[in-house]
Amino acid sequence: MSGLVPGLLPGLLPVPVFLPLIAAALAALLPARARAWLGLATVACTAVVVTAITAGVAGLPGRGSGEDALSLALAGWEAPVGIVLRADALSAVLLLLTSVVGLVVSVHALAAGRDADALPSMSSLYGGPAFWPLWLALFAALNGVYVTGDLFNAYVMLELLTLAAVSLVALGGRAGNGAAAAALRYLFVAVVGSLLFLMAVALVYAEAGTLDLPLAAERIGPGPLLHVALALALVGLAAKFALFPLHSWLPVAHPAAPAAVSALLSGLVIKAALFLLWRLWGILGPVAEPVVLQGLGLAAGAAGSIAVLWGSFMALRRRRLKPIIAYSTVAQVGYLVLLLPLTAGPVGADAFGAGEGSGPGWTGGVVLVLAHGLAKAGMFLAAGNLALAYRGDRLRGLGGAVTHMPLTVATIGLAGVSLAGLPPSLGFAAKWQLLTSALAGGQWWWVPVLLLGGLLTVAYTALMVRATFNQPGGPDAEPPARRLPRTLVLGPFVLAAGSVLLGVAPAGLLEFLGSGTGDVTAGAGDAPGAAGDVPPSGAAGGDGS
Amino acid sequence: MMPLLDLILAGTVLVTAVLAVLAPRRDAAASAFLIFGVLLALLWARLEAPDIALAEAALGGGVAGALLVDALHSRRPPQPQAASSWAARITGAAAGAALLAALLIGVRAVPQARAPLAEEAYARIPVSGVEHPVTAVLLNYRSYDTLLEIAVLAVAALGAAALAQGHRPVVRSRPAVRGLALVLLPVLLLLAAWLLVAGTSQPGGAFQAGALLGAALVIAHLAGIGLARPQGLAGLAWTLAGLLSFLALAAGTAVFGAGWLVLDPAWAPGAILAIEAILAVSIGAGLALIFLSNSASLQQNGPAGEPGRAAEAEPPAGAPS
């Protein structure tokens, strides 16, 4: 494999961006049926390319040798004049997640579209033929964020992502549920977030004279400019991934969208902004004054802790499936920013992604993104199925679903297990790593938040599952108004089951993440051992407090 | 003398921006926003960024103006919107003040020395295929970004077209309007073509030319000239042609050339001008498509979606009165 690396593999990096873009443009010009098949074929081909990229990243010698990422200078111009694409282990994992969830959602939309001729309400599952070009553009933008090594390119990708996502939300408007207003609100918040990120990029460029991220880290010094840039990026990106108190658009926008779009938004779209924040933190963070970095991390962690509790609390008070799941996303985003305080240690920045590999806290966060992406996408798709079968997602109207649609209810239950972080799910593996990291770093105050959040997640999952049981003492509930095709039921179940089963043997995944970003033998000096280690000993030097 | 003028200009930009946000009437806010766009273009010109000034004038003044005026015309609220609450205003003001303070701190720390990147970019102009540095950056050094920006516009047009229900009808307009359009259109087309060709050696290029083309298409439509209707499948095809040709160039260079988007100095000038020409047409078609989709859905959706609010009999823009 490594023999191929110098030649062919880096040349694949733009394919996950260009291929879906070509398909998006062509799909817009094709009739509805052909769009769906073109879309599915494109996502499948991209998934193959992404697998090859992942294999290539896994075959790299690792960070100790200074080679931890595939890179490609576009248009023949190296940085700082041109744009350089890079993919390391973190990129590869997120690319894979995007392809897997994208594949299942594409099959779902195709199956729903096939029946939409006979049953027009089926198109409410995915938004009609306009879904395909917009989703393919969204897919290209997600992949583009994960392979970029350039700050301004990241901004352009975020814009593409935002516009595609907002348009997809507005597709829910045919049902007359106020999707247009929700989409507009999402647009306003997302554009403000983009602007703040752009200001941060401009500030970094003003001092470093380059937009290439690793090069900027070399040329920029600690000082007020870098600190302001990091703060602006934190606030701007937090608005995009709906961190408390900038979250109020999410519980409106995600439920208003068609079910397939909700799955994409909660499972994938918010991860792109989060990924960029981690990237900045990992590469520019180590240059900043440790006190400032820890202060920003602490502020983000505090907001995240409130998000965990507030989101879960609001989810418990909702009485409809989709708003419950949307508030659950608000809560889970809180966990994901806990990574900032847990990894805010002084780590060297000698290579791309160098500062990111500080032990279990780091891998825990990445694994949590995977677990949440799979589980939440499965949960939203299953909720959409229930809403279609029972003509609405009110909890009160779902009685008897457990006997008539057992697999769909099981999907919600399994996804809830992973979100709550119960063993043996992937969510458990992730939260165990976060706990280990918090305790090892002496930041015990995050532990109650992690545990309480898990309990509340169990509670709102139980609330949703209980609503599908027959009324005690009452007659058996009627079968649902509509029967759904098997494909629609199986896809979400596969996602939810995956988010649990991957947790049974997470070693390979953890090792892969460690190989690209965690394993350090030279350079930084204070980095921990292999990130795959579950015992706390792995985090000995990971934190600077 | 000039610093004083600049100060007045910058101050006026700020005042019009605040007016655009705070004006209680929508038409007043829209007018303030349009003046803001024109003044901002002047400010960019004073900063010796003529490319941005041209784009801002065409987009901020022209296309955005057409969209705003059309939105005002199609759906007029019976009374001014209820003022936002004091809590919202205070939160907004506090957030703005915090941002201003952060930016002041950041900008004060910007080093005075000019970044070496500009010299590096200038040094490579001879092999870039163009003479104007901005065009070299947009279509050679960072062509990937430009391709994606075209994709952003295409997605915006696709989204707008997906939400629009039905086509906006062509309405015959008054002879005076039609006559004015017939005079204006050749001028705009000529200007767009000049900006496009000039872009290789001086300020101008596909974005500015495309914005003018879009304005021309909108004017033609408002004047009732049925020819120019970038709607339906043909409109989408024109809008997506630029993105598809750019992607074809990328794939072609990867398969047959030296790598993704690598332009050989031998044929770079021709390739860049060809791509720019297609991009300009697509940008124009895309902007006009957004405008027409917007007004079509306003007319068809607005009154039906909100019963009792807007009158059904609102005449479309440019209708005989």
Image (tube, coloured by chain):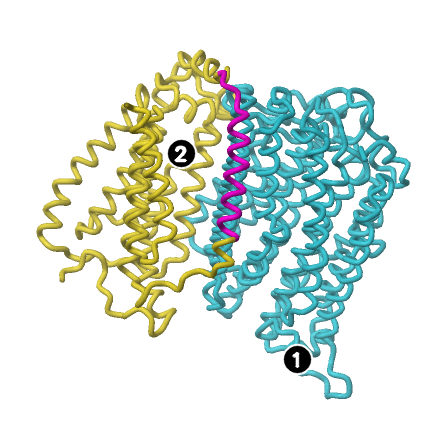
Chain colours: A cyan, B yellow
Residue B69: tell me if it is visible. yes
Q: Residue at x 12, y 49 (%)?
A: B178
Q: Is residue A157 left or right of residue A450?
A: left
Q: Residue at x 82, y 43 (%)?
A: A443
Task: Using the image, determine if residue A82 lies above or below residue A272.
Answer: above
Please name whichever residue, A240 or A413, is drawn nearer the observer in this view of the structure: A240
Residue A129 point in image, percent of width and height:
46, 57
Quadrant placement of the N terminus of chain B = top left
Amino acid bearing label 1: Pro
> Which residue bears the numbered disc 1?
A479
Amino acid bearing label 2: Ser
Q: CA distance from mark 1 to mark 2?
A: 53 Å
The answer as to whether the residues below labels 1 and 2 share one chain is no
Where residue A42 sits, quadrant-wise, is top right
Q: Is residue A23 left or right of residue A515?
A: left
> Which residue bears the numbered disc 2?
B245
Q: Is residue A242 magenta?
A: no
The stretch in magenta equals: B91-113
Task: Using the image, determine if residue A408 lies above or below residue B274.
Answer: below
Please name whichever residue, A477 or A325, is drawn nearer the observer in this view of the structure: A325
Residue B131 point in image, percent of width and height:
35, 16
